[in-house]
DNA sequence: GCAAATTAATGATTTATTCAAG
DNA sequence: CTTGAATAAATCATTAATTTGC
C-alpha cells in the first residue's frame, strides 16, 4: 500500500478519463514535516495571513493551496484530540473507569483470579512448545522492587507471582472485566 | 529466532553460583503467545486493571510482574508502529529528490524560491514522524479553485502565493507574524 | 560440539508531546 | 500560562541468537 508515489500513473483516477486527477491535495513529506513542526511549535489555528505565508513557503515543495493548510491544521488538531479520547473510550469499554491510578500496589493476597477468559479457546493449544523450557523460576532473591520506573506505573511491590493454579482461558474481548 | 526449542538445557545460568539472576523478565513462550494474541485481538493500552489480571493469569506460566505486562504492550505497540513506518520511510526516501523536482517545476513564475527557512535548520533532518500519510503527491495539474469549502476560511481566490520575495525564515514561535 | 565474540531482540528507562484543568 | 495526566518516541541495557575458531 501506500502508493509508491512513483508509478501508479493512474492511482484512483476514479473519474477515469479526465486524467490529471486533481482529486485532493497530496502533501509531500517535507510539507507534512514542516506543518507538523509548526504544530509542535504550538501553532494550532493559524490566522489567514499565517496560512498564506505557510502555503507560499510550502509551495516550494509541491502543489498546495491555502485551504490545504487551513484544513490540515483543523484536521490535525482534531485528530490529535480524538486520538487521546479514543484511549479513554477504549479503556472504558466495560466500565473500568480510567483508574489510571497507576498501579497502587494492589494485589497482595493470593487472590484467585476467577474466570477471566482472555481468549476464545484456542489459546491454550500451544502449551506444548514452550513446555520444554518451562523455566523453573525458583529464584527468589530478586528482591527487586526498587522499581524506579518513574514514568507512571508506580506499581510498588508488584505482583506476588504465586503462580495461580488454573490454566487461564481468558477472552479479553468479550468478557474481560 | 523463535527459540530453537531444541536443546539448551541450561540456557543462561551464567550467574554461576547464586543462580537466580533476576536481571530482567524473560517471558515464557506461553506468556508471549497470550500477550501477542491479546494484542492481535485489538488490545493496545490495557488499563491498570486489565494489566493486573493479565499479569495474574500469566503468572501461571512463570514469573511475571504487572509492570512487565505494561512494558510489553508499550514496546510491542511502539515497535509495530515503527515497523510499519519504516516501510513508508524506505519508500519515501526520495524526499529530497522530490523537493528538487518541485523546485524546478514550482518556479514557473520564474521565481527562484531561494532560501526559505521555515525552521532553524534541522527541520529537514528527520522526516518520518508524520508519515502516517506519506502520500506520494503524484501528478498535479488540477486547476481547482472551485473551492467549495464551507467551513469558514474565506480565503477568496486562494493561492496568492506568488511566492513572497523574501525568505520567510519563519520561526513561528518567536517572530512569525 | 562448545564457548568466546558478535549481532539481533526486546525489556526497562528516560525524554518530549499533547490536551485540558486550574 | 502553568501544570498534571497519559502516553509515544527515543534511548539505554541485558539477554538470546548466531557466528566463528578451535
Image (cartoon, coloured by chain):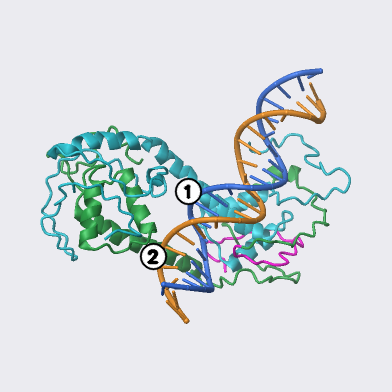
Chain colours: A green, B cyan, C orange, D blue
Residue A96 seen: no
- In depth, the one of A131 and A53 nearer the eye is A53
Residue A161 magenta-highlighted: yes
Query: What residue is pinned by disc 1?
Result: B81
The secondary element bearing badge 2 is classed as helix
Q: Main secondary structure of the magenta part?
A: loop
Residue A47's disc number = none
In the image, A158 versus B55, the foreground residue is A158
Structural distance between the alpha carbons of marks 1 and 2: 19 Å
Quadrant (top left, top right, bottom left, bottom right) of the N terminus of chain B: top right
Check if mark 1 and mark 2 are on a common chain: no
Q: Secondary structure at mark 1?
A: helix
Residue B16, position as x, y percentages in the image: 86, 42
- In the image, is B156 to the left or to the right of B95? left
Residue sitting at the far right:
B17
Q: Residue at x 18, y 38 (%)?
A: B107
Residue drawn at (34%, 44%) of the image: B134
| Chain of the residue where label 2 is placed in the rendered structure | A
Give the vertical position of D5 relative to A27 (above or below).
below
Give the magenta-colored segment's residue range.
A151-177
Q: Residues within 10 Å of mark 1 (few under 14, many from 20)?
A: few
Residue C8 appears at what percent x and percent y? 60, 35
Query: Does the magenta portion include A159?
Result: yes
Name the quadrant containing residue A15.
top left
Q: Is residue A110 visible?
A: yes
| Residue behind mark 2 | A81
In this orientation, which residue lies closer to the viewer: A55 or A114? Answer: A55
Q: Nearer the viewer, mark 1 or mark 2?
A: 2
> Horizontal and vertical percent for residue D7?
51, 60
Amino acid at each position: 500500500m501506500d502508493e509508491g508515489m512513483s508509478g501508479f500513473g493512474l492511482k484512483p483516477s476514479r473519474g477515469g478519463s479526465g486524467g490529471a486527477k486533481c482529486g485532493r491535495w497530496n502533501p509531500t513529506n517535507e510539507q507534512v514535516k514542516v506543518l507538523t513542526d509548526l504544530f509542535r511549535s504550538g501553532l494550532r489555528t493559524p490566522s489567514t495571513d499565517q496560512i498564506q505565508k505557510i502555503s507560499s513557503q510550502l509551495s516550494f515543495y509541491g502543489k498546495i493551496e491555502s485551504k490545504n493548510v487551513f484544513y490540515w491544521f483543523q484536521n490535525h488538531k482534531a485528530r490529535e484530540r480524538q486520538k487521546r479520547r479514543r484511549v479513554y473510550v477504549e479503556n472504558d469499554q466495560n466500565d473500568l473507569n480510567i483508574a489510571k491510578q497507576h498501579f497502587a500496589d494492589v494485589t497482595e493476597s493470593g487472590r484467585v483470579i476467577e474466570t477471566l477468559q482472555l481468549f476464545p479457546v484456542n489459546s491454550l493449544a500451544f502449551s506444548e512448545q514452550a513446555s520444554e523450557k518451562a523455566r523453573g523460576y525458583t529464584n527468589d532473591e530478586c528482591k527487586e522492587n526498587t522499581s524506579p520506573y518513574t514514568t507512571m506505573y508506580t506499581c510498588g511491590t508488584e505482583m506476588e507471582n504465586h503462580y495461580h493454579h488454573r490454566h487461564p482461558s481468558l477472552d479479553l474481548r468479550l468478557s474481560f472485566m
